[in-house]
Amino acid sequence: MKKNVSEVPEKSNFSEWFTYICSPQGGGLADSRYGIGGLIVHLPATMRMVRKIFQILEDEVEDRGHEPVLFPTMIKEANLLVEEEHAGFTPEVFWVETAGDKKLEERLALRPTGETQIYPMFALWLNSYNQLPFKIYQSRHTVFRNEMSTRPFLRGREFLFFEAHNCYETHDALMAEIADDRLTMDNVIRDRLFIPYLFLQRPQWDKFKGAENTYVADTIMPDGKRNQISSTHDLGQRFSKAYDIKVLNADKQMEHVHQSCFGPGIWRIMAAMIGIHGDDRGLILPFEIAPTQVVVVPIFKTATKEKVLEHTQALVAQIKQAGFRVQLDDREKSPGFRYADSELKGVPVRIEFGERDIDSQGAMLKRRNGTEKIKVPLDGLLEELKTQARLHDEAISEASQTYFEDKVNQATTLEEAIQFLDNQGGFVLVPFIGTDMSAEEHAKTLQTQTGGAYVCGTKFGEDESAGTEGQVCIVTGEPAKAWVYIARSH
């Protein structure tokens, strides 16, 4: 079993590195040997991290007025087909057709996403504008899609999900909610998980099936490819008309509500956190999210083991009482092995304690993303842990911003764009023919000419045509109507 840090693949070979870091023998995050393609076992470290991410998101949306619900896993086939465009999801759906040896009267779909199971209930629950805005969310559940190409935390047939669904009296109120969705991503994903991203409006041909518009948070993985980590959909009145979700307005007239939905991608967020922050030694995790925040490594010989362990156990108890998630690594392994293992697992702070430290009443501290060990007196240890936690997160934040700045570039010709995509990967801002349906064929041409680059969209809240004067589309050579971000994609 690999455990030596020298055996961790170099991150420059990102595919191999990511696979190893996710594996049980690497970072201990997932086991793909379940026996059904696209389904994984989420290992303890992952569950501790995603539970924390779920909790942060739940707190955030509840502060914005959302109430928690939980819907069943299965959906009636008839409900799935109500909204004509959204029915395009059906090729990706898993179906339940029998119960025991009896064929069901109607097929039931395993939930691919929540709209078609939630909105029939909205039609029963809502009847007055006084109930609006109406905002719910469901969390800590899974959805199912028949993905052909799968990889842990990037694409699967069953994956962790979080979704908020909302109804409003006006479209302006809906758009204000979408701005709040972006704020949620800023507060949680950028400021607490330190994942940088662009918040974009997708082109019309790449929006969510049945939506008026789709808005996304896109980041870039170390292989230079786009990773979509959230989506927000302006559903307008399309679904409310399809599912007959109406309320009596202030003028005593029945009208269909306006709707939006918001989905931070829990798996994709995990992939971004793993990929962007990690290094050649393994995981680097935000202090708040790390399953183990502090590891205490006792250093002893056979003759001193009992004495050193007695002191380190007392030290661990003190650290735990102060509110840190701490682990004592007293395995019969060399200190070097235990150091490397804690770095592979992304433990933010390591404390080394031996017989000499008993006499000196001090300990050695090493931060996961620091370069030097520091000697700390035991009576100042808890305060120093707080300092090291802050420095750890500041270093992650600074490194991720520097990383992302290098992944966003601008080009005015196809040749320049391809050069950036080949050499640096990431986003390239380019002049393009437009973002409405008439530009879809040119986007397909772009994809062919660039080796797979997609039109990701335009900056949310900005005039896409601003600054296009004198610019020509990099595909057609015609006057450009929009500046768009392009990138290759996972």
Image (cartoon, rainbow, N blue to C red):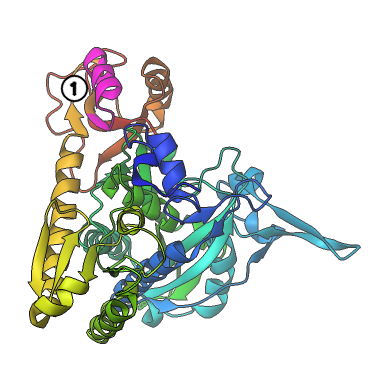
From the viewer's side, name the closer residue of 261 and 110.
110
Work out whether residue 203 or residue 237 is closer to the camera in this orientation and state it: 203
Answer above or below: position of 130 versus 416.
below
* Relative image position of residue 370 (x, y in whole percent): 15, 54
Q: Main secondary structure of the magenta part?
A: helix
Q: Is residue 230 left or right of residue 110?
A: left
> Residue 236: x, y in percent?
41, 56
What residue would you read off at disc 1?
A: 411
Quadrant in the rendering for residue 116: bottom right
Q: Residue at x 42, y 18 (%)?
A: 448
Front residue (pair 77, 54): 54
* Drawn side of residue 450 relative to residue 423, left or right: right
- Expressed as whole percent of the image width and height from the top left, the position of residue 278 reads 30, 48
Q: Is 279 on the left or on the right of 410, as rendered?
A: right
**Quarter in which the C terminus is drawn:** top left
Above or below residue 11? Residue 268 is: below
* 34 inside magenta stretch: no
Q: Indicate the amino acid at tag 1.
A: Ala
**Badge 1 element:** loop
- Image quadrant assignment for residue 225: top left
What stretch of residues is rendered in magenta? 414-428
Name the side, left or right, on which 105 lies relative to 168. Answer: right
Residue 20 in view here: yes
